[in-house]
Amino acid sequence: SMTKLGQWLCGLALLGSAWAALALAPPGLQPPTPLRQALLPLPIYLLVAFGCYSVATVGYRLATFNDCEEAAAELQEHIRAARADLRRQGLRL
Amino acid sequence: AMATAPQRLSVLLPTYNERDNLPLLVCMLVRTFRDSGIDFEIIIIDDGSPDGTQEVAEQLEKIYGSDKIVMREMMPVLFPPGTAYIHGMKHATGNFIVIMDADLSHHVSLYCMDCGKQKEGNFDIVSGTRYKGNGGVYGWDLKRKLISRGANFLTQVLLRPGASDLTGSFRLYRKEVLQKLMEKCVSKGYVFQMEMIVRARQLGYTIGEVPISFVDRLYGESKLGGNEIVSFLKGLLTLFATT
């Protein structure tokens, strides 16, 4: 099966050639002007849109990243209990 | 072979200079397993620690019994880095394997250890995640969290791995699955952990997730530097191009 890089290259080649065929077609084969005007900058628009999505997603995930205060406190407690247990069982540190 | 439920858990602990943390972790694990009633063994694979880790491991073996604690030493000269798991697996008698860090950064959660999640969905792999549910971290500043989330986002976009946390390094594996993945994975270090999840998905294994709390007690001492970030990106791009 294809690698992720391979999948990306295939996908980009497909979309890229579709875009090129429509947006860069010679006169005579061109789609209507409004469509052409929308198609030409489409790659840049998509890139910018993806950039905004990335920033928003990472920002959201950063803001909702849990701080595990309880877990840290519980861990400290477990460590204390473990130290006592080990001392009782004769571990020499 | 029919997929069975966990009957005996083998916990693999690769150690290097963990003389202080190891006994605490082993004590906590033993207590957790005894409370949950699951049969277990703890396999300590030491990488030639100069600080006395092996002596401590031998004492633990005496305290808890050598059917429960197994100590194996790795000769760094003979074994290349990253093979602690392969070495440890040879001695594992459980049908499920837990891989976790030996530096007490993981909150030892009963839910993880009694295989509740695994039984829920009969998963081949259960992976701990810091990014979902009530998983999270303790002791990280904003910058560290941003790097973590940014790196994870990049990983999700490029690899679409089907797991939310590839570098959380707390995992439960069915033994045959881990053996198969060990054969197929070629990366070194923590990229190896990432590769295992990616390959697991490709091979059709099922992956469940449990939230884990990563309590970073060492952050003050070891900052995440440019070197680590560069090597992460190299590893990620390698996986992108080869899996």
Image: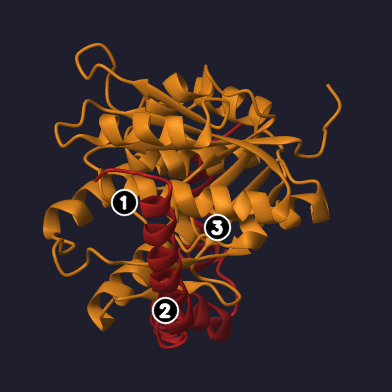
Badge 2 density bin: few <14, some 14–19, many ≥20, Cα 10 Å: few
> Looking at the rendered structure, which numbered label has been put on residue A41?
none
Residue B183, position as x, y percentages in the image: 52, 20
> Which chain is in red here?
A
Quick check: B5 left or right of B161?
A: right
Q: Which residue is mark 3?
A: B128
The chain letter under disc 3 is: B
Q: Which residue is mark 2?
A: A73
Of the residues tagged 3 and 1, which is closer to the observer? 1
Badge 1 density bin: few <14, some 14–19, many ≥20, Cα 10 Å: some
Say which element carries label 1. helix
From the viewer's side, name the closer residue of B145 and B170: B170
Give the CA distance from mark 1 to mark 2.
17 Å
Q: Amino acid at mark 1?
A: Asn
Of the residues tagged 2 and 3, which is closer to the observer? 2
Residue B18, position as x, y percentages in the image: 26, 44
